[in-house]
Image (cartoon, rainbow, N blue to C red):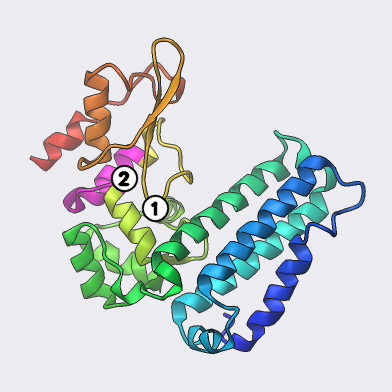
Amino acid sequence: MAGNPRRGAGFIGLMKDAFQPQQPLQQPAVVEKKMVEKCWKLMDKVLGILGIYHAREMEVLGENEYFRVVMENLTNKTKQTMSLFKEAKERMYEENSQPRRNLTKLSLIFSHMLAELKAIFPNGLFQGDNFRITKADAAEFWRRSFGDKTIVPWRTFRQALHEFHPISSGLEAMALKSTIDLTCNDYISVFEFDIFTRLFQPWSSLLRNWNSLAVTHPGYMAFLTYDEWAIGYVTADGNILQTIPHNKPLFQALIDGYREGFYLFPDGRAQNPDLTGTVRALL
């Protein structure tokens, strides 16, 4: 873990060198230049939110556990992206290639990191210890288990959650981690926990809901959701629409949508899982 705040300047320089648009790879393509510029602008935006252009703030942030974890993860993911471009070469621009899929996933990770930073650092000020978890039961669990911590190691989180919602196996634990750890850093933040508990509410049947939707339901698209979740569907005339349900659990929105004739073929499949058992289990 990078605990020395003075190392931040070197990291900023590394990212500027890596993503500077006026230093493209040899024989650059138009898509390559746009992609590099986009990456650089995103990284610059992340740094601006953290406020690390000011040495005094950097010293304060260097003592912040959440900040250190984020910076370590940002460093690792940036190096992965650089290595991916270096090793994949022209295959990076083949839309269906494995390197391109890896880049898409890394792009989503950066996007998740940015969304989290905006929530934890509103107006550039750290508010992680005052972050409000939406669901009362989930908020009480976090407070009792972790106090005012903003982020905890996955292992610690798993042990605490297991006391309330037993995790049946190592495989289930791995699947759970892949759903909740949006930034892929082996930590769970209060922001990620809030998203997970809102998406798979109510708290009383949290893991049962998650199993029914994220694990077994063909329509659930992992790694594409944060902050607000949406349901996409195709209308009778072939248009693709998206809706964001409010004030109801995801499974209830899917059940209601099925009854109304909207959500009929998850991921284009003819068989639509019956989620009414999830509702009966709550009664």
Q: Are marks 2 and 1 in contact (CB under 8 Å)?
A: yes
**Which residue is found at the position 47% from the left and 55% from the top?**
182
Quadrant for residue 99, please give it: top right
The location of residue 258, given as percent across then percent down, is 26, 21
Q: Can residue 195 be seen by looking at this rendering?
A: yes
**From the viewer's perspective, is 117 left or right of 231?**
right
Task: Give the CA distance from mark 2 to mark 1.
Answer: 8 Å
Image quarter hosting the N terminus? bottom right
Q: Secondary structure at mark 2?
A: helix
The location of residue 9, given as percent across then percent down, is 68, 81
Does residue 212 show up magenta in the picture? yes
**From the viewer's perspective, is 87 left or right of 50?**
right
- The amino acid at mark 1 is Leu
Does residue 168 show up magenta in the picture? no
- Residue nearer the viewer, 254 or 272: 254
**Which residue is found at the position 60% from the left and 79% from the top?**
53
Residue bearing the label numbered 2 = 210
- The amino acid at mark 2 is Trp
The location of residue 23, given as percent across then percent down, is 85, 59
What segment is highlighted magenta in the picture?
Answer: 199-213
Q: Residues within 10 Å of mark 1 (few under 14, many from 20)?
A: some
Q: Can residue 168 be seen by looking at this rendering?
A: no
The location of residue 221, given as percent across then percent down, is 45, 37
Quadrant for residue 253, please give it: top left
Seen in the picture, residue 215 relative to 274 is either above or below; the reply is below
Q: Secondary structure at mark 1?
A: helix
Numbered circle sitting on residue 176: 1
**Which residue is found at the position 37% from the left and 72% from the top?**
156
Seen in the picture, residue 146 relative to 240 is either above or below; the reply is below
Outermost residue on the left side: it is: 283
Image quarter hosting the C terminus? top left
